[in-house]
Amino acid sequence: MILLLGASGYVGSAFVRHLNARRIDFRPVARRRVDYYNVDHLVQVIRESKASFLINCAGYTGKPNVDVCEAHKHECLMGNAVLPGVIREACDLCRLPWGHVSSGCIYQGERPGGGGFKEDDVPNFCFRTDNCSFYSGCKALGEECLAGADNVYSWRMRIPFSHIDSDRNYLSKLMRYDRLLDVTNSISNMDEFVEACLQSWENRIPFGTYNITNTGAITTREVTDVIKRYLMPDKQYLFFKDEAEFMEQVAGTPRSSCVLDNSKILNSGIQMSDILTALERSLANWIPRENQS
């Protein structure tokens, strides 16, 4: 029995699809029925369900983007920094192993000397470096709340995308916009991310933090080239001159653009496709909103 928090969200819904497809017994725990921030309530649910594992997909991202978090700091702080600590306390009391969906947005750029950030690199896009969005700062605090835990996986996702059209899908966003900022990022195919998370528990790989991204890095311009090749050959994209122009004309808060090293999850025996393969597969099997049941 797996308990799933945040099942109705974008990431949580992907877990629901995969758990159902695998016929794994799970129970979604809805906020309207259980106070996520009450340790006693969580402990009661864990013990009554006799769960063997818990997955936390709950958090606060802001809609349509992280700029909203600047105006809803309380919700952002509670969902991304406080909640992981509350769940940790409940799971520790019940001696329950669990997994937490985290984010690579706590980094900016590449690792000093080149290459992607590794799991034990200190965040450089957080409150302690005073250069981040409120969202990224809270996600970094959430990871600090889990430091030293010996029963949790911290699964870092980076810019999710899939073959299913959605407001939260990175590819869908790029299809809607006409002007973009060309930056280099790691990205995560949603289906591969969820499978890697589930396999980490099934295979009993060591607890700890894992960057679960597709192998490699890619620029915004390269992604739009693939989109044009598969779905939108006539679309013309314009790009901002630099980040300063983007910030001045569009963004209300700094954005994380970063490269993560995924060698730790690969070395555990769990496979992740290279970025280009994952992108091409998603676009070749694209399901627009009007075709979704």
Image (spheres, rainbow, N blue to C red):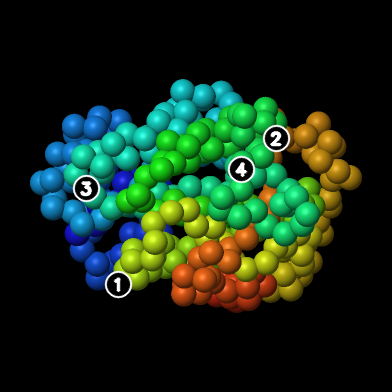
Residue 200: where, in percent of width, then height?
A: 39, 65
Q: Which residue is mark 1?
A: 22
Mark 3 burial class by Cα count in 10 Å: few <14, some 14-19, many 20+: few
The quadrant where residue 187 appears: bottom right
* Disc marking residue 122: 4
Earlier sequence position, callout 1 versus callout 4? 1
Q: Is 9 in front, or is 96?
A: 96
Q: Say which of marks 2 and 4 sits in front.
A: 4
- Mark toward the start of the polypeptide (1 vs 2): 1
Residue to which mark 3 is pinned: 95
Q: Residue at x 44, y 41 (%)?
A: 147
The secondary element bearing badge 1 is classed as loop
Of labels 2 and 3, earlier in sequence is 3
Q: Nearer the viewer, mark 1 or mark 3?
A: 3
Residue 269 percent across, percent down from the top left: 46, 74
From the viewer's perspective, is the residue at label 2 or at label 3 nearer? 3
Q: Position of residue 59 (x, y in %)?
A: 43, 40
Q: Is residue 165 left or right of residue 42?
A: right
Query: Foreground residue, 261 or 15?
Result: 261
Helix, strand or loop at mark 3 = loop
Query: Is 121 above or below relative to 41?
Result: below
Which amino acid is tagged 1? Answer: Arg
Q: Residue at x 72, y 70 (%)?
A: 226
